[in-house]
Amino acid sequence: MTSSTSPPSRPTNDPRREGFGSVLRSEWTKLRTVRGWVIGLVAAAVLCVAFTFVVGHGNQEGGCTGPPPPGSGPNSPGTNCYTGHPFVPTGPNGEAVADSYRLVEQPLSGNGTLTAQVTSLTGLIWTGPANIAPSLAHTKPGLAAWAKAGILVTPSTHQGSPYAAIMATGSHGIRWQYNYTHDRPGLPGAITNSAPRWLRLTRTGDTLTGYDSANGRTWHEIGTANLAGLPASVILGLFVTSPVSFQRSSSGAPTQATATFDHVTLNGRAVSDVRQSHSIGTGSQDYYPTLGTGSAHRPGNTFVLSGSGDIALAVNPLAGGDTASSSLWFGLIAALIVTIVVATMFITVEYRRGLIRTTFTATPQRTSVLVAKAAVIGVVAFVVGALAAAVGVPLGMHVLNGNGNYVFPTTTLTEVRIIAGSGVLLALTAVAVLALGAILRKSASAITTGVLVFALPYLLGQLLSGSAQEWLFRVTPAAGFDVLGVLPHSAQVDYPSTIANGYYPLAPWAGLVVLCAYAALALGTATFLLRRRDA
């Protein structure tokens, strides 16, 4: 007769046999049952919204109540008096654009080709004092790198209209550009009497094609553009424009370019007279500082045009505008500091009270405890940051608009990215400082370290400039704030793209990757130490 005995079974509620889900629920219960932590997290969201409102309300357009000085536009250099934010055109895809130039119009019905030789391109730069309106009275010779002269086609002279243009530039050779964001290079080199350039623009239905040539016989196709819905009758003509130069100061100095066109032909026939000449977008309410309205005349068989402005993306230093995230950053800093305090105490309190031994006795797998804590505080911090930003972004934009500020257009997708990115920013920081708490075990030292490492770099970045500021937002946890970036960089515009002007050095999600690396390093170090030292 044989008998068998079964090994005694553990009770089903033995914590040693419980899975990760049970550990996760346990840590969630710890967080939500401590009133001070819950109040702190709610306070983080409230502070974020409150500071967003305060910053937006304090950022009022203009510095006085009177009108601008005679002859000056609303954003003339040295002018702090505004009657409202200046007009900023909107391009075909909803982006803020600059659209100011001198145009000699040649109407075109149906298909056709305009050809011209650019024989010279010279310029002037404003040198006058900052407290007077720009004029030709205070200038010196000088050609802006992105001064442009060439052939343009557009359905309308209304600012922000679609266009395609083949052009000579001050320092970037021949370019084919369309709709403010597309650019392709052609022949290199500057325009001189000994080295003129030939330009040609052909329309075939909705398709525009740009060509260049060094001799007028051998032509090279640079690129094409499809302007869907182009009407049968379009405006085709010669244009000249010249952007602001930032060589003298961050506020920029207006410039003017003058180009001479020869051998101008339309469909092979010489264009013998100046048709309509327009100064596009150089009124006093246009946001782009210009050096006069330019001119157009025809000495002999040539056309001579002078113009000021630009045809490109708008940039913040010129528009003096704000973005959807302009008022949010200070509120996020406040929320970040509060989150750092709660996240570190989520683990250091257990060390201070000796409860960590009980936790590790119930769950011998210490890594599971740390991961569960990180998951709980990370998710909660994400919700806090995302909810605060979801309220703060539209609130900040509303307040800024109410104060007369210009707010750069932002797509719904970009706003969603800012909101989600704000949540990820707080979540990654919370996980990182939780790991610091596990490493240092003391609340005061962990909180201090967390603030110094994850909050202070951003505040320092607001005080620095140049390469120091740029590298701070590339290699420190401050890179996480790059997720607030809204304004696009453009190689077609020379301007100071600084943090103060709303430009961040990294792409939004690339900045979060840098912050994620810091969080992973801290969490990995904490895991290593938890396994090798006593509780």
Image: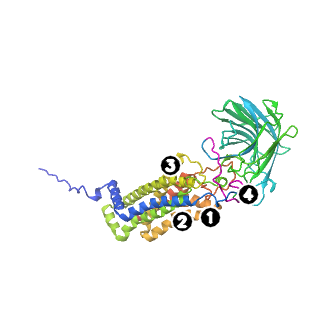
Q: Is residue 483 visible?
A: no
Q: Which residues are magenta?
A: 71-92
Mark 4: give few (<14), some (14-19) or many (20+) Cα within 10 Å. Answer: few
Quadrant holding the C terminus: bottom left
Circle 2 packing at 10 Å, graded few (<14), some (14-19), many (20+), is: some
SS assignment at label 2: helix
Residue named by callout 3: 416
The label on residue 464 is: 1
In 3D space, how far apart are the residues under numbered discs 4 and 3 (Cα atoms)?
37 Å
Residue 112, position in %: x, y? Answer: 74, 30
Report crowding for label 1: few under 14, some 14 to 19, many 20 or more residues within 10 A (C-alpha): some
Q: Is residue 462 above or below residue 409?
A: below
Q: Sequence order check: which comes first, mark 4 or mark 3?
A: 4
Name the kind of residue labelled 4 in the image. Gln
| Residue receiving disc 4 | 247
Kind of residue sitting beneath label 1 = Leu
* Residue type, label 2: Leu
- Residue type, numbered disc 3: Val
Q: Which residue is mark 2?
A: 456
Q: CA distance from mark 1 to mark 3?
A: 29 Å
Disc nearer the start of the sequence (2/3): 3
**Sooner in the amino-acid sequence: mark 1 or mark 2:** 2
Q: Magenta includes 80?
A: yes
Name the residue furthest right: 300
State how far apart marks 4 and 2 are (Cα). 32 Å
Q: Residue at x 47, y 61 (%)?
A: 47
Query: Tag 1 or tag 4, which sits nearer the N-term?
Result: 4
The nearer-to-camera label among 2 and 3 is 3
Of the numbered discs 1 and 3, the one sitting upstream in the chain is: 3
Quadrant of residue 196 in the image? top right
